[in-house]
Amino acid sequence: MNKHKLILSLALVTMVMLFTQLTAAQEDITLEFYHWFGADLGDTTIQEINDRFNELYPNVTVQFETADTSTYEQVINTRLSADDAPDIFGVFPGTKFHPQAEAGFLMDLSDQPWVDNLLEGGRFSATYDGRIWGYPTDANVIGVIYNKAIFDDLAIETPATWEDFLGTCEVIKEAGIAPIALGLQSAWVTQLIPYAMSPSAIYRDDPEFDAQMYAGEATFVGSPWQQMMEDYVALNDMGCFNDSILGTDYNLSTDMMANGEAAMLVQGNWALAALAEKAPDAEWGMFALPYDNGGEVWVPAAIGGLMAVSANTEYPEEALAYIEFWASPEIQELYLTAKKAFPASAGIEPDLDPASTEMFPYMEVGSYPFLDQNWPAGVQGIMLEDIQSVFAGEISIEQMLQDMDDAWVDATE
């Protein structure tokens, strides 16, 4: 028996023992679980997981609620500050959860049995001050999802350079189809194209850029961000996006893809789940946004989210049992197959979407985490708001970058 299988077997034994302990009292309890990921999946998969948990622990009911990421972040921060935390809730990987850990809102999960099975990326994303504060549920990559039928009909090859990509947009536009569906009404969507540009534009050649920012040796102003944003805006000026991008949200952008009104969507692999539901007969592909900048194309790849336990939960044993249940291979494979996402733990083999697997060669060339996972708190929020303002014509790119610099300084003083 190999190491990972032994660990998983021991985890199952532990789960059975815990089941015996928790059900002995038979006290009916309700665990409140709040997370943003249900907004992508819908409630069906999460409900199935919760039903299976209830079969194992008949006296424990999981009450699940979800919201889009922007709403979620506002609500959870308010509830944490008001000492009204859910028993289990999502935290964003990387630096964003560090203040929550420092404030004592999160339970230390370092001694949990699933920790030894985490892959390096998952472990890194959940670690602060040498301890583990959340269970990494999935890993994701951002790229260009495309309609293979449209590409075949127009005899388009997947573009390998930025020049090729712009040419692809022109061919699709001339065919009367929106080249790229973009829903900037959903604030979190605004960041995805810069996130897809930055690994090649910045971190491939300057992997210490964030460290330089923290040291006060670099700024957004005067960095490759200027050209990235100019090229982002130029895509709109060229007609590469659908009409009314500020009046289009994420859901409508996936509708456009499913209906054949748009050919491409710059999104994470998680969007494949929504597309599969809306257009089950369509064939999707995925390639890296080829913002090559004269070199190799790198991609943004990172842990999608963490599940944390409130340090003040009234039901710590049950909450930990729920996290451990999620970490089991059966539940992980169910969740990841539904979400079209990659595992963050060893020994997990989900049925990946074929489009997701097309990103493997790009990921092997080079990748960098989602930017906010290395940024201080507050910078991402300013960026999201200001990108909307740039496209609304309310502020300049220069003002946006200065605002981001100011937010960085404010957060690190």
Image: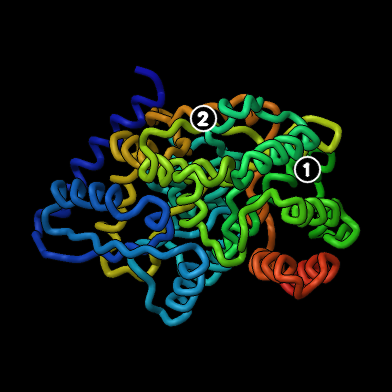
The residue pinned by badge 2 equals 149
Above or below: residue 263 compared with residue 396: above
Where in the figure is residue 267, as x and y percent of width and height?
Answer: 57, 46
Specify the quadrant that holds the C terminus.
bottom right
Q: Is residue 210 visible?
A: no
Q: Is residue 317 left or right of residue 387?
A: left
> Is residue 332 shown left or right of residue 176?
left
- Identity of the amino acid at label 1? Tyr
Between 220 and 375, the one lying in front of the other is: 220
| Residue at the spot 26% in from the left edge and 57% down from the top edge | 317
Of residues 335 and 20, the one nearer the viewer is 335
Question: Residue 203, which numbered label?
Answer: 1
Colour basis: rainbow
Local secondary structure at mark 1: helix
Q: Is residue 384 above or below residue 324?
A: below
Task: Find residue 336 and report its horizontal and vertical position in percent.
Answer: 39, 39
Q: What residue lies at 56% left-to-right and 38% top-to-bottom?
A: 145
Tell me if mark 1 has few (under 14), some (14-19) or many (20+) residues whose alpha carbon lies within 10 angstroms of its own: some
- Residue occupying the far bottom of the picture: 82
Q: Quick one: label 2, few (<14), some, or many (20+) residues within 10 Å?
A: some
Residue at x 52%, y 64% (from the top left corner): 101
Give the residue at x 59% y 30%.
151
User: SS class of the residue under badge 2?
Assistant: helix
Q: Is residue 164 left or right of residue 15?
A: right
Quick one: which residue is furthest to the top in this view? 1
Tell me which amino acid carries mark 2. Ala
